[in-house]
Image (cartoon, rainbow, N blue to C red):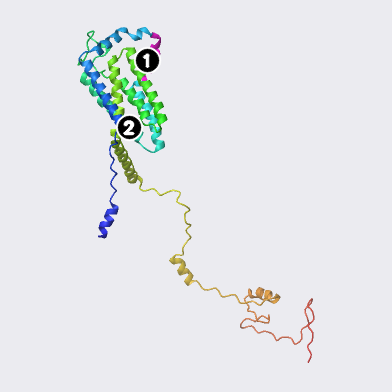
Amino acid sequence: MRTDIFARLDREPEPPKIEAPRMSRHRIALFGGTLAFYVAIVWAVLITSWLVALDWKVMLFRPYQQWPELHAFLDYYVVLGQRGPTAVMVACWLGWRSWRQHTLRPLLVLGTSLLLLNVTVGAVKLGLGRLGPHYATQIGSAEMFAGGDIFPSGHTANAVVTWGILAYLATTPRARRYLSAVSATVSLGVGLTTVYIGTHWLSDVLLGWTAGLLILLALPWFEPLIARTETWIFAVRERWRERRGGARPATGAGPQPVLLPQPTAADGLAAETAPAAPPEPALPAGPAGTGVRARAHTGHTAQPGGMPVAPAGVRRPPPHAERGPRAGSPARPMSGG
């Protein structure tokens, strides 16, 4: 019974179950309307409707010839929609946020959105195979299923997703509003720039905006997967640290105790075998004691009266009967009788 209790305690706790966030009715309605608009654009191009005729009118208008002074600036501005430079810039910013907040969620959200972008937009591009304005073969034709890869516009969809991630990850409503306006302005400008340069039809840009918005609206459904991935990465990191260096001692735990040298067995044996020092004789108080202490170090014992005792084998001469007082000492009075 006790073994079962300890086995339960040693068992690793199960990770908490992460449920998919509930989408609000407003977001669900917005996602459904955007998806319907996406399908409508594809259908309008497939049947060569008025939208294709508008594409040809804009293309024959040749905007890059109408305003040539903007061409030099827009050649650089369109880079804000290229996947490589924009992904690096946004990843650096989100990486700094991840380091400060000790979480991988910003980077994982960016990676998930770019993965969805490549899969969805890339699949539609290759499946429809539309040719661009510079490679069109017949005026008024939709140029579908001809081996192209421009429908929808990847530049536009990438601008919507990459810059929209900043608004999606904003922590305050005010920052979310500002970043949403910035991302909408950048993505709108990138899409119109591709039409100005002549690399995309207008319908390509419309579908690119719609595709990017669908990815941003669908991101909350991938939040549980992002959270599980973050937990798994941190668990792998901890196991790798334990396998490499083991548990590290905690720093700042307080003052360490000072260890004093303890007597060993050899020290105790030496203490037992060493002869005991003779005790120092008790010395009388007063001035006589000082002289006796000085004479005690010569190897002779002292008598209570202050007279030294001769060593063994030495014959002491008889004491004198009368001895005068010492120089400088007061004379002793004679006692009567």
Q: Quadrant of the C terminus?
A: bottom right
Q: Name the element at disc 2.
A: helix
Asked whether disc 2 touches disc 1, contact meaning CB atoms under 8 Å apart, the reply is no
Residue 314 on image: x %, y %:
64, 83
Residue 117 on image: x %, y %:
28, 26
Q: Is residue 114 above or below residue 263?
A: above
Q: Main secondary structure of the magenta part?
A: helix
Q: What segment carries the magenta color?
A: 68-79
Q: Is residue 282 above or below residue 18?
A: below
Q: Is residue 147 visible?
A: no
Residue 177 on image: x %, y %:
40, 27
Q: Amino acid at mark 1?
A: Asp
Query: What residue do we see at 39% from left, 26% from top?
Result: 179
Instruction: Name the residue carrying label 2.
Output: 109
Is residue 44 rendered magenta in the image?
Answer: no
Instruction: Name the residue carrying label 1.
Output: 75
| Residue 238: quadrant of the picture | top left
